[in-house]
């Protein structure tokens, strides 16, 4: 009778799984997927559920790399169930982090937030720094996805530091790419607000971080990461107006196209297509972008889908094919709306409280070199925790506070007896925006104004969506100081790049400002501010009256 050495088989399988992981870390994830799939089949036939769960966990990552997110979800769900049933928290943390990342790839940020929360919880409970690095990185990407670059940068920096602390060069490379992406998002927002110097600074920082990642990718032989780095750098250079350097990046990209996958091919095609759009070479751009469209059904990320149709509309418009440009732009907006703030802002904001008030204080207490910065961030978060803790105070579309919160805050201000100012803000000709561009565009305008308010207001000020296109801003200090803040807001809205939402769109706001010392009650101060707003609109709109 033949004796089967179970331990020897297990050791051989684990060694093969490590070989597969090495392939996945050096740009050969299709081979890694095939190898891990074979090990998975063997594990199932032998009844080795633990080895099968290890395979499922790794396969989820390979599926992410090659743009097969739905297939990855099938595997990672099984892995999560197994690790949870066995109580292996570190393994469960890894699996849930991949789960969250794949959900985000499919445009499901709400579900991604839930899994990332659990992954971070588990990683913290075990103290495993590799799991903490992975989970923290996924959280950073969620903040980046929700256009909160400051928080994304903070979490991504932490993930890079954790990777360095355990000497994991692959994780360090991958997380540096995401840290660069978070800086680029901050740069894009700054540019849209007319803050060109700050936008330039953040994009230069994004380029530097991505160059660091590229150096590591070349050293470790990770062609997948190298392609992402060069594609991202081309995009950053494009936003800086340095189109020659962007083209050089894409030419260099071709050196790393061995073992290329669908999502990489998509990024190459739409990024180079946009480079050609910037050069005015619309025929060349169109050819590349149409090829990218053909790859959509084969996989790739949700973000790629959005970018392809946006750049395709630019190419058609450049060629004077306006009907086709409109059709492509509609597809872009349909995809964009699936990822709108209505579905994500509320839970993303609650996640901020959960992650940052607990995690950042721990970091502040354990890392002396960063203690001052992190403690300051923590203190700021602590001041907001009480009012953010309940979702009933949030407006889903804009991510701002709602009218119920305003009523609560007025009661506090009345008891505090401190002087404050109130501004009533109204979007000029908002009905015409809805009529001429659609209600979907109108919703995006309101969401963008919410973003502008969050970026422009002082830490002591608070913005509330009062109803429809009307907003209320609570400001500390006198009406004169409040009027200066409101003038900055007015200018920021006027100079925002509204063409990113729809070509030909122009948006301005009117604002009325009143001080608490001139009124006897919150209701009265609102009425005075509303009267000032009426005066601003009657005087020609796009102005502040105090």
Image (cartoon, rainbow, N blue to C red):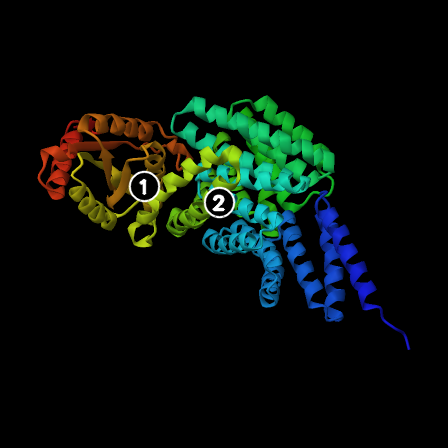
Expressed as whole percent of the image width and height from the top left, the position of residue 283 reads 58, 31
Residue that lies at the very extreme toward the left in this rendered image: 520
Going by the picture, which residue comes out furthest to the bottom? 1
Residue tagged 1: 446
Locate residue 298 relative to residue 346 in the image: left or right: right
Q: Is residue 72 above or below residue 136?
A: below
Q: Earlier in the sequence, mark 1 or mark 2?
A: 2
| Vertical position of residue 7 compared to residue 285: above or below | below
Quarter of the image for residue 272 reads: top right
Q: Is 230 in front, or is 366?
A: 366
Q: Is residue 397 left or right of residue 515?
A: right
371 vs 352, nearest the viewer: 371
Q: Quadrant of residue 540?
A: top left
Please tell me whether mark 2 sits on a helix, a strand or a loop: helix
Whole-angstrom CA distance, mark 1 to mark 2, is 36 Å
- Label 2 CA crowd tier, 10 Å (few <14, some 14–19, many 20+): some
Does 218 sit left or right of 545 as displayed? Answer: right
Query: In this view of the protein, can residue 63 be seen by the observer?
Result: yes
Regarding residue 428, the answer to whether it shows in the image is no
Q: Residue at x 55, y 50 (%)?
A: 101
Residue at 23%, 38% (x, y): give it.
474
* The N terminus sits in image quarter: bottom right
| Circle 1 or circle 2, nearest the eye | 2
Query: In the picture, which quadrant includes the C terminus?
Result: top left
Label 1 sits on a secondary structure element that is helix
Q: Check disc 1: other Cα within 10 Å, few if <14, some if 14-19, many if 20+.
A: many
**How far across and down, in percent of the image, does residue 15 sit?**
78, 55
Name the mark on residue 285.
Answer: none
Q: Which residue is mark 2?
A: 362
Q: Position of residue 115 (x, y in %)?
A: 51, 56
């Amino acid at each position: 009778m033949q004796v089967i050495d179970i331990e020897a088989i297990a050791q051989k399988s684990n060694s093969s799984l490590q070989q597969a992981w090495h392939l996945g870390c050096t740009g050969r994830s299709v081979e890694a997927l095939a190898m891990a799939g074979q090990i998975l089949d063997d594990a199932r036939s032998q009844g080795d559920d633990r080895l099968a769960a290890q395979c499922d966990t790794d396969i989820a990552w390979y599926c992410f790399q090659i743009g097969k997110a739905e297939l990855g979800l099938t595997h990672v769900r099984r892995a999560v169930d197994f690790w949870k049933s066995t109580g292996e928290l570190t393994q469960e943390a890894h699996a849930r982090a991949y789960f969250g990342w794949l959900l985000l790839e499919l445009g499901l940020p709400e579900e991604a937030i839930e899994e990332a929360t659990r992954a971070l919880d588990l990683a913290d409970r075990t103290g495993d720094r590799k799991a903490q690095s992975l989970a923290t990185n996924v959280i950073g990407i969620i903040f980046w996805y929700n256009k909160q670059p400051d928080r994304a940068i903070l979490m991504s920096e932490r993930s890079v530091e954790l990777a360095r602390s355990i000497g994991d060069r692959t994780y360090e490379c991958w997380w540096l790419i995401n840290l660069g992406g978070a800086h680029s998002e901050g740069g894009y927002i700054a540019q849209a607000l007319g803050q060109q110097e700050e936008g330039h600074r953040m994009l230069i920082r994004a380029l530097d971080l991505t160059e660091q990642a590229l150096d590591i990718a070349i050293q470790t032989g990770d062609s997948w990461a190298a392609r992402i780095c060069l594609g991202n750098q081309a995009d950053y250079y494009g936003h800086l107006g340095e189109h020659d350097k962007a083209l050089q990046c894409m030419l260099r990209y071709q050196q790393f196209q061995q073992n290329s996958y669908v999502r990489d091919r998509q990024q190459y095609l739409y990024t180079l297509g946009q480079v050609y759009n910037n050069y005015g070479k619309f025929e060349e751009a169109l050819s590349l972008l149409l090829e990218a469209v053909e790859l959509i059904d084969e996989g790739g990320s949700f973000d790629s889908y959005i970018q392809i149709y946006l750049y395709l509309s630019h190419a058609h418009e450049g060629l004077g094919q306006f009907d086709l440009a409109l059709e492509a732009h509609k597809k872009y907006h349909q995809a964009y709306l699936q990822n709108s703030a209505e579905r994500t802002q509320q839970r993303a904001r609650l996640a901020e409280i959960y992650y940052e008030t607990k995690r950042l204080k721990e970091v502040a207490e354990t890392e002396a070199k960063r203690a001052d910065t992190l403690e300051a961030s923590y203190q700021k978060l602590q001041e907001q925790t009480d009012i953010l803790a309940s979702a009933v105070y949030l407006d889903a579309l804009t991510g701002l506070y709602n009218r119920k919160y305003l009523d609560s805050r007025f009661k506090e201000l009345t008891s505090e007896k401190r002087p404050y100012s109130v501004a009533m803000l109204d979007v000029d000709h908002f009905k015409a925006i809805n009529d001429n561009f659609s209600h979907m565009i109108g919703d995006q305008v309101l969401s963008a104004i919410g973003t502008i308010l969050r970026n422009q207001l002082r830490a002591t000020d608070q913005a509330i969506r009062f109803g429809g296109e009307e907003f209320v801003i609570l400001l500390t200090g006198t009406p004169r100081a409040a009027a200066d803040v409101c003038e900055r807001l007015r200018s920021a809205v006027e100079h925002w790049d509204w063409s990113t939402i729809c070509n030909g769109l122009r948006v301005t706001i009117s604002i009325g400002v009143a001080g608490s010392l001139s009124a006897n009650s919150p209701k009265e101060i609102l009425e005075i501010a509303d009267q000032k707003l009426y005066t601003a609109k009657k005087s020609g709109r796009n102005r502040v009256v105090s």
